[in-house]
Image (cartoon, rainbow, N blue to C red):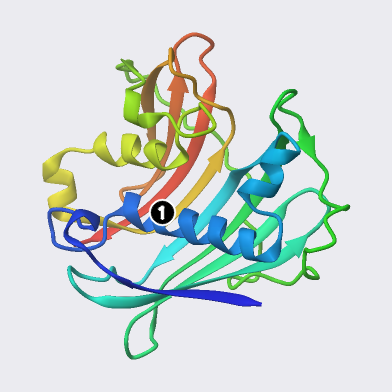
Amino acid sequence: MRHTNQLNVKSYFINRFGKLSTSFMFYQMQEIAWEHANILGFGYERLKKENQFWVLSRLHVKINRRPEWRELFNLETWSRGTDGFYGYRDFNFTDRENNSIIQSTSSWLILDQNTRRIVRLNNFKEFPEYSESSFGSNPVRLKPPHSDEKLKFSPVLFNEIDINQHFNTGRYIERITDSYSFDFHESYEISELEVNFLKEGMPDDMLAVKKEKVDELTHICSVIRESDKADLIIARIVWRNR
């Protein structure tokens, strides 16, 4: 069963180049995933009754082009089932001519609200049978960046905390993209993004972005916490000339 929304790129969805921003691209995938999970019977409200909640664990996105301001596009999602540990979900953005412009595959976990332990998915009968992703593989585990650059820590802001009372996953992506200069963004745009979400950020955390250049266009980034030096997320970004 697939679920599709027709969307319009609104003015508050766009970046300074008039195209769908990376963070709103992510928020739209997150929103339709929650919506479809509710339809399938394992969404937010059901899990809340069991003191459980979904967390995004891994994400892999390939961007052919971004829809522009006021452009209509379709966002389609479907569950690819579970291996008993992860729940897998794919996404496909298509334009009005039905061209695929953005594709993504993702891995999700259910956590217990009280213990923060992972809940096995074998008992969720609503899951469809496992199937392969659009990319032919699932999102992979990333290695953290290596860098001797001095880190600049800053506090978590009020709007960065989500309904589960921890750092919003989309805000991590904003932290990373905002760590690049205006001049860099003038020259480059993201063509591929892989993210591992590892630990929960909390309201009293101090966070910094750490970067390693694998080559000129491939960077490994992490959002690191000052108190324990833990990587909360690790991201692999492939840039291309704008």
Asked where in the image residue 150 lies, by quadrant, the reply is top left
How many circles with numbers are drawn on the protein? 1
Q: What residue occupies the far bottom of the structure in this picture?
A: 97
Tell me residue 118's x, y (percent).
Answer: 76, 36
Instruction: Read off the residue under disc 1.
Output: 26
Which residue is nearer to you in this view: 196 or 40? 40
Mark 1: few, some, or many residues within 10 Å (few <14, many ≥20)? Answer: some
Q: What residue occupies the far right of the structure in this picture?
A: 123
Q: What residue occupies the far top of the structure in this picture?
A: 227
Q: Amino acid at mark 1?
A: Phe
Which residue is nearer to you in this view: 70 or 25? 70
Tell me residue 147's x, y (percent).
Answer: 40, 25
Q: Is residue 213 visible?
A: no
| Quadrant including the N terminus | bottom right
- Please report the residue visible at 58 percent of the width from the left and 28 percent of the height from the top: 199
Position of residue 213 relative to residue 161, above or below, is below
| Quadrant including the C terminus | bottom left
Left or right placement of residue 238 versus residue 179 in this view: right
Which residue is nearer to you in this view: 121 or 17? 121
Tell me residue 100's x, y (percent).
Answer: 41, 80
Helix, strand or loop under label 1: helix
Left or right placement of residue 240 versus residue 30 in this view: left
- Please report the residue visible at 64 percent of the width from the left and 69 percent of the height from the top: 133
Asked where in the image residue 38 lies, by quadrant, the reply is bottom right
- Please report the residue visible at 64 percent of the width from the left and 47 percent of the height from the top: 45
Tell me residue 8's x, y (percent).
Answer: 27, 71
Position of residue 24 relative to residue 109, above or below, is below
- Please report the residue visible at 75 percent of the width from the left and 64 percent of the height from the top: 81
Q: Is residue 61 visible?
A: yes
